[in-house]
Image (cartoon, rainbow, N blue to C red):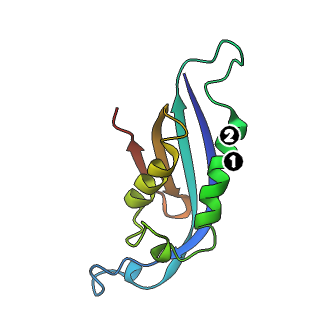
């Protein structure tokens, strides 16, 4: 069984590894959605795979670190691609949620999504 929780955040970034090739080398912003999937068997006492309150608290901490920030200045996100944001989020959540199996980050207005299936 899997549970899924989502947050939204707005942030700026730039991807300057090839500054003349694309407009994303310049500073710009996006609205992002970050989804996490946690897998497991429901606890027989609570009926939960994980307490959504705990998941919400953890995602609120991520949102605080990302929302209305320049992502390039966030420690560990110096190159803030969708791929790197997924890995960054997974690293911060995995110890608290051993059943974490997937992190998805999207920019809905661009129709772009990255899905990181956590290695077992």
Q: Which residue is mark 2?
A: 54
x%, y% of residue 39?
A: 51, 27
Residue 113 visible in this rendered orientation of the protein: no
Q: Are marks 2 and 1 in contact (CB under 8 Å)?
A: yes
Taking the spot 67% from the left edge, 54% from the top edge, the residue there is 60
Tell me the tag on residue 45: none
SS type, badge 2: helix
Q: How many marks?
A: 2
Residue at mark 2 to residue at mark 1: CA–CA distance = 5 Å
| Up-down relation of residue 92 to residue 99 (above or below) | below
* Residue 63 horizontal side relative to residue 19, left or right: right
Indicate the position of residue 29 as horizontal and vertical percent values: 54, 75
Local crowd size for mark 2, using a 10 Å CA cut-off: few (<14), some (14–19), many (≥20) = few
Drawn side of residue 6 relative to residue 70, left or right? right
The one nearer the camera, 106 or 81, is 81
Quarter in which the C terminus is drawn = top left
Query: Can residue 70 be spotted in the picture?
Result: yes
Query: Label 1: how many residues lie within 10 Å, few (<14), some (14-19) or many (20+)?
Result: few
What's the residue at 50%, 71% (across, down)?
Answer: 74
Residue lying at the far top of the rendered structure: 44
- Location of residue 54 with respect to 41 vertically, above or below: below
Instruction: Tell me if residue 48 comes above or below residue 100 in the rendering.
Output: above
SS for callout 1: helix
Image coords of residue 118 (percent x, y) = 38, 39
Quarter of the rendering containing residue 96: top right
Where residue 8 sits, quadrant-wise, is: bottom right
Q: Which residue is mark 1?
A: 57
Estimate the x, y position of residue 12 in percent, counting from the top left. Answer: 54, 76
Q: Residue at x 40, y 78 (%)?
A: 24
């Amino acid at each position: 069984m899997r549970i899924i929780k989502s947050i939204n955040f707005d942030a700026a970034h730039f991807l300057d590894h090839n500054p003349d090739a694309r407009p994303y080398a310049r500073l710009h912003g996006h609205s992002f959605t970050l989804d996490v999937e946690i897998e497991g068997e429901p606890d027989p006492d609570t009926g939960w795979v994980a307490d959504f309150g705990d998941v919400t608290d953890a995602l609120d901490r991520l949102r605080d670190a990302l929302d209305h920030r320049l992502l390039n200045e966030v420690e560990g996100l110096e190159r803030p691609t969708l791929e790197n944001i997924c890995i960054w989020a997974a690293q911060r959540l995995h110890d608290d949620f051993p059943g974490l199996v997937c992190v998805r980050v999207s920019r809905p207005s661009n129709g772009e999504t990255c899905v990181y299936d956590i290695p077992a």
